[in-house]
Amino acid sequence: MLSTIPTGHRFNHCDRSRRANGHSFPVNGFQVENLAASASAPYLAYATATIACATSQPTCSIKLYATLNEVRGDANHRPGRRDKMSDDQIPFDHPELVANPEPRCACLLLLDTSGSMHGQPISELNAGLAAFKEELMADAMAVQRVEVGVISFGPVRVHSDFQNPDTWTPPRLEASGDTPMGAAIEQGLQMLDARKQVYRQSGITYYRPWVFLITDGGPTDSWRHAASLVHAGDNDDRKSFSFFAVGVQGANMEILAQISRREPLKLQGLRFRDLFAWLSSSLGGVSRSTPDTQVPLTNPTGPSGWASV
C-alpha cells in the first residue's frame, strides 16, 4: 500500500542540495517534485507534489508543505531544527488559501429540493447548476476568486462547503420531503460565518458574500428567527452578506418578502439556466472589482431578463 505524508507535514530532514522549482529532490525517502514557494505566505512553501515511495510503487498527488528556508536550502538552516511559527500564519488546514491567496467572493446557494420540485423543475435546476459551473470556468478571474457553497432543503443537506469553481462539482439534486427553509437559512449563514472566519485567520480579503435562495413553496418549519438573521446581516450598516430570494411558480412570495430585505424575484417559467448565467456574470463582475466597491448589475427583470417582481 502506498505510503503518504499527511497534510501539514513539515520537512525537517530535507536534503539542502535541492534545485530550482520544477526539479525533484529526495525528502525522507520520498521523491517530491515541483515544490514552489507561495508569494503570499513567506513562512511556507506549498506544492502539489508527486510522491513515490523508495519502492517502485505507483505515485499519487498530495498536498505538501515545507518551511521556506528548507526549500531554499539556506546556509543557516540545520536539518532537524524546528522553525518557530507564530499563530497568525496561514494554517495548514486550508492549503487552497496558501496556493491561491486571491480575494474571495463567496456565493451560497440555498436550494429547495422538496417534493413539489419533482420532475421538470428539479431537472431544470440541475441543468442550471451544470451551466453555472461552465460559465464560472470560462471566467479566469472568477475561477480564482469565486467560491461556491451549496445547501439543499427537503431535508437540509450540505452538498458542498465553499470551493473554487475548478474544484466544485455541481450536485445532482433529487426532490423529496418538505420545505425546512428556516433551518436551511440558519445552517447556511453559520457555514458562511465560518468561512469568513477562515478568510480572516488566513489573511485573505473578501467581497461581500452573496446568498441565493431558490424555492417553489413556503417554509414548513419555523422561519422567523432565520428572517431576523437575514435582516441583521444584510443591511447598510453591517453588510455581512447580500441575500436574494427567488420564487419558482407556486412559491409563497409573501413570506419570502418577510425573509428578504430585497424584493423577492419571480422566476419566469423554469429559466434556471438564464438565472445562473446572470449569477455567474454578476459574480465575475464583482470578482474583477476591488473589495468594498459597488458593482452595477444587469437588471434581471428587464425586457430580456429571467425574472419579474
Image: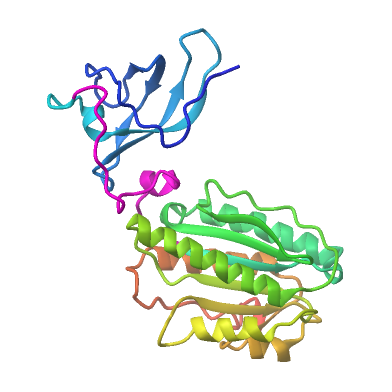
Nearest the viewer among 260 and 226 is 226
Q: According to the image, what is the colour scheme of the structure?
A: rainbow
Corner quadrant of residue 198: bottom left
Residue at point 50%, 77% (across, down): 242
Dominant SS in magenta: loop
Q: Is residue 144 above or below residue 117?
A: above
Place of residue 85 in the rendered image (x, y in percent of width and height, measured from the top left): 27, 43
Residue at point 67%, 64% (across, down): 273
Corner quadrant of residue 72: top left
Task: Answer yes or no: is residue 309 visible.
Answer: no
Task: From the viewer's perspective, tell me whether residue 22 is left or right of residue 179.
Answer: left
The span shown in magenta is 78-105
Task: From the viewer's perspective, tell me whether residue 142 is left or right of residue 89.
Answer: right
Nearest the viewer among 238 and 173 is 238
Task: From the viewer's perspective, tell me whether residue 40 is left or right of residue 179.
Answer: left
Place of residue 27 in the rendered image (x, y in percent of width and height, measured from the top left): 35, 19
Q: In this view, which residue lies farthest toward the top?
A: 55
Task: Answer yes or no: is residue 8 visible.
Answer: yes
Nearest the viewer among 138 and 79 is 79
Q: Is residue 22 above or below residue 277?
A: above
Q: Is residue 101 magenta?
A: yes
Place of residue 44 in the rendered image (x, y in percent of width and height, measured from the top left): 29, 39
Task: From the viewer's perspective, tell me whether residue 136 is left or right of residue 188.
Answer: left
Q: In this view, which residue lies farthest toward the left?
A: 75
Q: Is residue 257 magenta?
A: no
Corner quadrant of residue 50: top left
